[in-house]
Image (cartoon, rainbow, N blue to C red):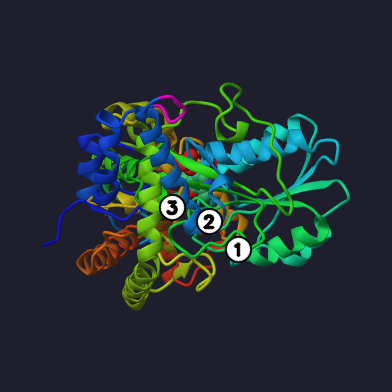
Amino acid sequence: MLKLPIFMDYHSTTPVDPRVLEAMLPYFTQKFGNAASKNHSFGWEAEEAVNKAREQVAQLISCHPKEVVFTSGATESDNLALKGVASMYREKGNHIITAVTEHKAILDTAKRLEKEGFKVTYLPVKPDGLIDLELLKSSITDQTILISIMMANNEIGVIQPIAEIGQIAKERGILFHTDAAQAVGKIPVNVEAMGIDLMSFSGHKMYGPKGIGGLYVRRKNPRVRLLPMMDGGGHERGMRSGTLNVPMIVGLGEACEISGKEMIQEGLRLTQMRKKLQDHIMGELDEVYLNGHPENRLPQNLNMSFAYVEGESLLMGLKEIALSSGSACTTATLEPSYVLRALGVGSDLAHSSLRFGLGRFTTDEEIEYVGKKVVEAVNRLREMSPLYEMAKEGIDLKSVQWTEH
Amino acid sequence: MSYSKKVIDHYNNPRNMGSLDKADKEVGTGVVGAPECGDVMKLQLKISGGIIEDARFKTFGCGSAIASSSLATEWVKGKTLDEAFQIKNTEIVNELSLPPVKIHCSVLAEDAIKAAIADYKKKNDIA
Ligand SMILES: Cc1ncc(COP(=O)(O)O)c(C=O)c1O
Ligand code: FES
C-alpha cells in the first residue's frame, strides 16, 4: 500500500534505521557513562561502545580507528578540516583549492579564511559537474597547502574523480580533504586507495542520527596535524574537546556497519529505481534535461530541469511528495541554485529543476506514483505557461526583449 | 513555504487561465518578467466600449505569482481602463496574504495589467 506523503528528499536527511535506534537506546538510560571516566565500569562501558563505533566507522572507510575524530556533523568536520589545516600549516603556504559546487560548509569556511588572508581558488566545473583535473594541476602553486573537493554533490549527485585528485595532491605534497557527507555509506570509500588525508562525513545522511559525524584525519604518510577549534579536555587526540556523545556515536557506528553490509545491493536496487523514474518521466515529457553526469553519480540522485515550468509551482503541484528544487522562488535570497548555474545551466532551467533523492526505504510503488504525478503536474503547468505557448508558436525565447525587474 | 488558502485555491482552480487572440484590436496583451528571474506573466484584456469585458492569464512562476495573476483577471473584469489602472499590488498582497518574499509576484501582476492597457491603447491610438 502506498503511504502518503512520500519522502523523496534523502539528500537532505534520512530517517534513523530502526536497527540503529535499537543499538542506541541502552546508552541513554542504562549505559550512560562518560567515556572519559577511567575509574569505574560506567565509564569503561561507554568507552568500549565508543571504541566499537570507531572500529565500525574505520571498517567502512578503510582506515585505522584512531584516525576517526567524532564531531557534530559534516559542517563541523568541514570547518575543522579547513580552519585546522589552514592555521597549522600557515607557515608552509597560504593557498587553498576548492570548487564552486561545494557545500556552503566549505564555501563559507573558505570565504572566512580569505578574510584572514588566505588565497582560495574556486575551480569551475565542466557541464557534467566534474572538475577538470588539468585545471586542478595548473592551479597548484608552491603556496598551496590544501585541496578540498567534495566526493559526491548534494544537489546533482555527481561523484568527483577522488582517487585521481588524491594522486595529484600526493605528488605535489599537498593535503587533500574531501567532504564525503553524501558519499559515505552510499558508495565504496577507501581513504587509503583514494589518497585522502582528511574526510568529512555525517550520521544523518546514512540512516544514523542527526548531530553526529566525523572527520577522518590521516596519522601516517603524512601525519596530518590540525589546530583544534574547540579547546578543553583534549578528547579525540586533542582535535575536538568535549564529552563524547555516546548514544549518537553508537548510532553512527551501527549505521556505518549496516551501510557497509548493504551498500552494494542497495546501490544496485536504487540505480534501477532511478532509471525507471527517469525513463518514465523522459518518455512522457519533452524538453526535460538531466543535470549532472549521467553515470558518474550517486545511485540515489536524479536531478532534472523541466523547461517552461518553475520549480516552486511544480513542488506545489506535488504536495504529497517531499522533493527539493533549485528554483530561486524556494529560497529567501531569490537566487537560483549556484550548483546548477556552475554547470552552465541557464537561469531559466535552474528555476525549473527538481531534485529526487531516493533512499533505503523507497519502494517501486513510490517511484511509479512520483513519475505519474510529475508528468501530470508538468503538463498542467505547461498549459499555464506563457513560455511554453511562445515556444510552441516557434518564438525563440532567447530573442525576446524581457522586462527584467 | 506555506501558502494561504486563497493562494492554494487559485493555484488549484486558476480563474481565466488561457489566451485571447493577440491580433484582435480589442485585445491588449501585457507580458512582464523574464525567464532568468523565474517569473513571466502574460495578461490579456478584451476591451469593449472602454470596459474590460474579458481577461486571461498565463504565468511561469511560483504559486504566488500564479495566484496573483489569476486574481488580477478576476478583479479587472467589468472595470474601466482607468479603474483597472488603479489596482495596486498591495491590494493583491492583502487579499492573498502574501509574505514579504512574495511581494514581487504581486508587483508583476500590477505591471502586467498596466502593460496590457498600454498595449491596447497603443494598438488603438489612444493617448
Ligand atoms: C555535501 C554536504 N556537506 C556538508 C553537509 C552538512 O552536514 P551536517 O548536516 O552533518 O552538518 C551536507 C548536508 O547538508 C552535505 O550534503
Ligand atoms: S515567481 Fe519567484 S517568488 Fe514568485
Q: Does label 2 or label 1 sit earlier along the sequence?
A: 2
Does residue B73 appear left or right of residue B31 in this picture? left
Residue sitting nearer the eye, B3 or B47: B3
Q: How many marks?
A: 3
Q: Position of residue A264 (x, y in %)?
A: 40, 70
Cα separation between marks 1 and 3? 25 Å
Q: Is residue A167 visible?
A: yes
Residue sitting nearer the eye, B48 or A99: A99
> In which image quadrant can residue A241 be found?
top right
The C terminus of chain A, quarter of image = top right
Q: Is residue B4 above or below residue A267?
A: above
Query: Furthest residue to the right?
Result: A142
Q: Nearer the viewer, mark 1 or mark 3?
A: 3
Instruction: Specify whether residue B28 is painted magenta.
Output: no
User: Given contact means CB atoms under 8 Å apart, are the residues at marks 2 and 1 in contact?
Assistant: yes
Look at mark 2 in the image and give the residue it sits on. A153
Seen at 59% across and 27% down, the residue is: A234
Query: Furthest residue to the left?
Result: A1
Look at mark 1 in the image and give the residue it sits on. A160
Q: Is residue B57 visible?
A: no
Look at mark 3 in the image and give the residue it sits on. A56
Instruction: Return the chain for callout 3.
Output: A
Seen at 30% across and 32% down, the residue is: A31
Cα separation between marks 3 and 2? 24 Å
> In which image quadrant can residue A171 be found?
bottom right
Q: Position of residue A370 (x, y in %)?
A: 26, 63
The N terminus of chain A, quarter of image = bottom left
Residue sitting nearer the eye, B27 or B56: B56
Q: Residues within 10 Å of mark 2 (few under 14, many from 20)?
A: many
Cα separation between marks 2 and 1? 8 Å
